[in-house]
Image: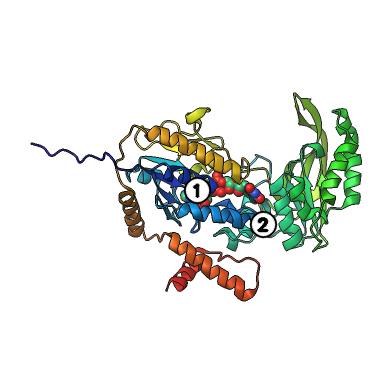
Amino acid sequence: MSEQPESNEGQKHVVLVIGGGPAGIFLSDRLAKNNVDVLLINRDIRPGGLVEYGIYPTKFKLIGGIRRQIKKVLALPGIHYLGNVPVGSSEVVSIETLRSLGASALAFTVGAQGTNYLGIKGEKRARVYHAKDLVYHYSDLPPFAKQEFPMGQKVLIVGMGNVSVDIAHWLVRVKKVAEVTIVARRGPAERKYTGKEVKVIAANVDREDLDAEFERVRSQLEAVGQDVDAVKAEVMAELDKKPLEKVSETKVRFRYLYSPEDFLGEAEDGPLEKVVLVENELYQRGDSTGCRSLDKKVEWAMDSAVFAVGDKVEDALGLPYERGRYLTGSEGIEAYQVQGQADNAPLFVAGWARNASDGLVGVAKKDGQTCADFILETLKDKTAEKSLEDVESALTQLLTEKGIRSSNLDDVAALEAAEAKVIEEKGEEGFKFDDNESMFAAIDRERA
Ligand SMILES: Cc1cc2nc3c(=O)[nH]c(=O)nc-3n(C[C@H](O)[C@H](O)[C@H](O)COP(=O)(O)OP(=O)(O)OC[C@H]3O[C@@H](n4cnc5c(N)ncnc54)[C@H](O)[C@@H]3O)c2cc1C
């Protein structure tokens, strides 16, 4: 008589969560609290995603608060964490490899790691950057931390949201460049930054220049029925509300109703020297205001430019991908489920991996939790194949064979302890080791 396969009834499901930012953390939390084990793997040595490497580093209180929540989640017995494990078609760990480990489902919460090129001439020229790379650089994320990003003295920021303000914050208060020009394709009423955020650069805004800019666009705004004086009063009130003290002579200028059209430099692939922009006019589009270009151009001399227009997901991850998004359905559970996948080990996406650059930490957290609810529903009547220990040991064996050192929670705690010592010794407000080698060296010293 042939041997019957062992019954797995009663065994807990294991979900592999890929990406340790807010979406992945709170997705894991919801699963673990509903009797599902989680193996959480993350590209970076430490968990947190953009909480560690995105939110402006001097927002100590905000970052500290979210860090505490993350620690609490990762301390749950049903969650195991492995850092320094990048997944992707060109990485050691591919999606196929992960699927072969026997987890009941895979959830991708890898954020928006792709660059959103807009198809503008010269946009790949030297000294034309995307905000994500600069943010990773000043937040000390390897390998961006060690890369050079020469900015020069005159910098153009394309986009007028909170990320633009973060970049301007760094340029005004750390780099202390001479001029920062923040340009929007629409008008001041459509600005996307919030009053709370803009106070960090408010003291450097050139008020005379801003007055003149409002006069320049006055007739355009009035043409779509906007009350220019009321909008101006709002913009000024935001700048006047508790501005941070001035630490540099950087002049910050806002420019409205312009779109970049060409990034020019003397040599074919040489650095940026000039930006050509086209003027726009506003028009009413239902409840919102659209813009279209006029036949009028300006040229501004610039040393560097930064796109702060949102990101897209990384196509090289290996999930079905189209136009900046991983392919999912549009509603309910299908909006979280990757299309065209087999029934065993279904694939899900959540957070910025599902909707790139969409919202604050709270939005990513909620999206992770919603995704977890759908995963729980999917697994309800299924039998688990492998235990957490089985899945984890299969993965760690593979990593060992490939010579990859992963980090666990004890390592992360050791890293934080080592960094806290540097902060104390140097009397600095914040410090992070900024390459993987020095992080692991610090971990080893601390744990020895
Ligand atoms: C510049 C900036 C400033 C911000 N400031 C604020 C703020 O002040 N307040 C606020 O509430 N929100 C802020 N946000 C938004 C907030 O950071 C996001 O809402 C949130 O981090 C998105 O969470 P996520 O988990 O979807 O993605 P992420 O936070 O990006 O996390 C993705 C995780 O996936 C991992 N990963 C990526 N690729 C792979 C891979 N191939 N394999 C394995 N792991 C991978 C990464 O290491 C990372 O840990 C800011 C965002 C930016 C860009």
Residue 253: numbered disc:
none
Q: Name the image quarter holding the N terminus.
A: top left
User: Is residue 215 or residue 345 the one in the foreground?
Assistant: 345
- Residue 412 percent across, percent down from the top left: 48, 62
Amino acid type, label 1: Ile
Residue 25: numbered disc:
1
User: Is residue 325 or residue 35 the one in the foreground?
Assistant: 35
The residue singled out by tag 2 in the image is 59
Q: Is residue 333 left or right of residue 400?
A: right
Q: Is residue 148 left or right of residue 300?
A: left
Query: Secondary structure beneath disc 1?
Result: helix
Return the residue found at the far left.
1
Give the quadrant of residue 85: bottom left
Amino acid type, label 2: Lys
Residue 352 appears in the picture as rendered: no
Please rate how many residues cluster around mark 2, counting C-alpha atoms within 10 Å: few if below 14, some from 14 to 19, many from 20: few
Query: Secondary structure beneath disc 2?
Result: loop
Please rate how many residues cluster around mark 1, counting C-alpha atoms within 10 Å: few if below 14, some from 14 to 19, many from 20: many
Give the quadrant of residue 6: top left
Q: Is mark 2 within 8 Å of ligand 1?
A: yes
Q: Name the residue at 56% across, 64% down.
A: 434
Q: Name the image quarter holding the C terminus.
A: bottom left
Q: How far apart are the two marked residues, 2 and 1, measured between alpha carbons? A: 20 Å
Q: Is residue 56 left or right of residue 433?
A: right
- Residue 215 percent across, percent down from the top left: 92, 40
Asked if 446 appears above or below 43 in the picture, the reply is: below
- Residue 268 percent across, percent down from the top left: 68, 50
Q: Is mark 1 within 8 Å of ligand 1?
A: yes
Q: How many marks?
A: 2
Residue 93 appears in the picture as rendered: yes
Q: Name the residue at 13% across, 39% down.
A: 3
